[in-house]
Image (tube, rainbow, N blue to C red):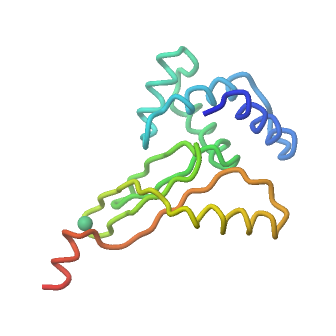
């Protein structure tokens, strides 16, 4: 993730949304950018605490929603009320099996980006982030359904 670009996006978000800018939030962006793959709130907290940025989960939790609202993070709803998060570093695609709860990351076909760009353009939107989560049954669970 390009840090300068992300910082520009974050500042633009604070300017336009009227939310309070703080160095803590800027620090959090650095932590989010360093997260690999999908992560839990606890994992994000450990990473932020290791850098000395946050000391309470509640603070992190409040800020997490700012980043979700701003389009930097997507909340992935898993089975049983579990939640994971993923940084919006580009085009992410996920398959969630409602049978066993397995979450798999997928590569989106090339045509996806073109459709997206067209929609952004049509609605005069500045592209920010996109995540797709498709729900269904995985190959193992599919066999159970068929039987
Ligand atoms: Zn399954």
Measuring from the top left, give residue 6's x and y in whole percent.
70, 34
Closer-to-camera residue (41/31): 31
Q: Residue furthest bottom?
A: 147
Quarter occupied by the C terminus: bottom left
Quadrant of the image occupied by residue 97: bottom left
Tell me which residue sits at (29%, 58%) in the image.
102
The reply, left or right, for residue 92 in relation to residue 101 is right
Measuring from the top left, give residue 28's x and y in whole percent.
61, 28
Measuring from the top left, give residue 71's x and y in whole percent.
66, 48
Q: Residue furthest left?
A: 147
Q: Residue furthest front?
A: 110
Total numbered labels placed on residues in the image: 0
**Relative to 114, is 83 above or below?**
above
Tell me which residue sits at (52%, 52%) in the image.
75
Measuring from the top left, give residue 124's x and y in whole percent.
85, 63
The reply, left or right, for residue 50 in relation to residue 13 is left
Q: In which quadrant of this rendering is ligand 1 seen?
A: bottom left
Tell me which residue sits at (56%, 57%) in the image.
131
**Relative to 139, is 146 above or below?**
below
Tell me which residue sits at (67%, 28%) in the image.
3
Quarter occupied by the N terminus: top right
Quadrant of the image occupied by residue 123: bottom right
């Amino acid at each position: 993730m390009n840090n300068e670009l992300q910082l520009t996006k974050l500042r633009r978000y604070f300017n336009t949304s009227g939310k309070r800018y703080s160095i803590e939030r800027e620090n959090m962006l650095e932590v989010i950018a360093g997260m690999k793959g999908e992560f839990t709130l606890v994992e994000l907290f450990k990473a932020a605490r290791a850098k000395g940025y946050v000391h309470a989960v509640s603070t992190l939790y409040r800020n997490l929603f700012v980043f979700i609202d701003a389009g930097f993070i997507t909340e992935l709803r898993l089975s049983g009320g579990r939640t994971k998060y993923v940084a919006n570093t580009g085009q992410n695609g996920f398959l969630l099996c409602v049978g066993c709860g397995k979450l798999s990351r997928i590569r989106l076909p090339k045509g996806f980006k073109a459709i997206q760009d067209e929609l952004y353009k049509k609605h005069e939107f500045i592209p920010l982030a996109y995540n797709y989560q498709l729900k269904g049954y995985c190959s193992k669970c599919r066999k159970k359904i068929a039987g």
